[in-house]
Each structure stands twice: as structure tokens, then as C-alpha cells.
């Protein structure tokens, strides 16, 4: 981080699989310090639920557009290389 950049108030570490690995709240003015871990865990849970819902919507939209169940795509793709 450059000297002129401010430290982020909230940092989320996401894996290459788009899953949350970690979350840190750096600005203690945003919460009661004794409840920091609880708040971080609540945020992680909320974000994970939102990600899962978004994935469900994308899968449903893909099925409607392609007339293919996204669960079947892996089998279809596997058949191309067999």
C-alpha cells in the first residue's frame, strides 16, 4: 500500500473459487470492539448467502436461455473430451 493510500475500513479476502476466505474490519468506529468477531462472522454469512442466491439465479437464467440444466453441462463437456 502506498503512503498516500488510506487503510481500508473493511477488507475481504476471496479465493479463486469466489468464496470468502476472510474478512477484517479495520475501523473500530464502525462497531463495538468487544463484538468485532461476531460482526465479522455475521457479514461473512450474509455475503455467502448473497453469493449462493446469485449463483442460483444465474443457473436458473442459464437454464432458461440455453434450455439446459446447468448441472448437466459438466456431463456434456466431459463427453466432448471422451
Image: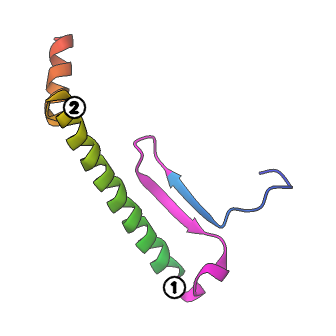
Whether residue 21 is in magenta: the answer is yes
Which residue is at a point 24% across and 35% down the rendered structure image?
62
Could you say where residue 28 lies in the image, as x and y percent from the top left? 65, 79
* Mark 2 crowdedness (10 Å alpha carbons): few <14, some 14-19, many ≥20: few
Q: Secondary structure at mark 2?
A: helix
- Residue tagged by mark 1? 35
Number of numbered discs visible in the structure rendering: 2
Local packing at callout 1 (Cα closer than 10 Å; few below 14, some 14-19, many 20+) is few
Q: Helix, strand, or loop for circle 1? A: helix
Check if mark 2's residue and mark 1's residue have beta carbons within 8 Å: no
Q: Position of residue 66 (x, y in %)?
A: 19, 28
Q: Judge left or right: residue 68 versus residue 21.
A: left
Which mark is first along the chain, 1 or 2? 1
What colouring style does the render use? rainbow
Can you tell which of label 2 and label 1 is closer to the viewer? 2
| Residue 10 screen position, x and y as percent | 60, 65
From the viewer's perspective, is 52 left or right of 9? left
Residue 50 position by quadrant: bottom left
From the image, tell me which residue sits under label 2: 65
Kindly report the distance in space between the C-alpha atoms of the residues bearing marks 2 and 1.
45 Å
Identify the magenta region. Answer: 14-35
Toward the front, the furthest residue is 65
Amino acid at each position: 500500500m502506498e503512503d498516500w493510500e488510506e487503510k481500508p475500513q473493511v477488507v475481504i479476502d476471496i479465493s479463486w473459487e469466489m468464496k470468502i476466505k476472510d474478512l477484517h474490519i479495520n475501523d473500530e468506529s464502525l462497531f463495538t470492539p468487544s463484538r468485532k468477531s461476531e460482526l465479522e462472522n455475521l457479514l461473512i454469512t450474509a455475503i455467502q448467502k448473497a453469493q449462493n442466491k446469485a449463483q442460483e439465479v444465474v443457473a436458473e437464467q442459464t437454464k432458461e436461455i440455453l434450455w439446459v440444466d446447468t448441472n448437466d453441462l459438466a456431463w456434456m463437456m466431459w463427453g466432448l473430451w471422451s
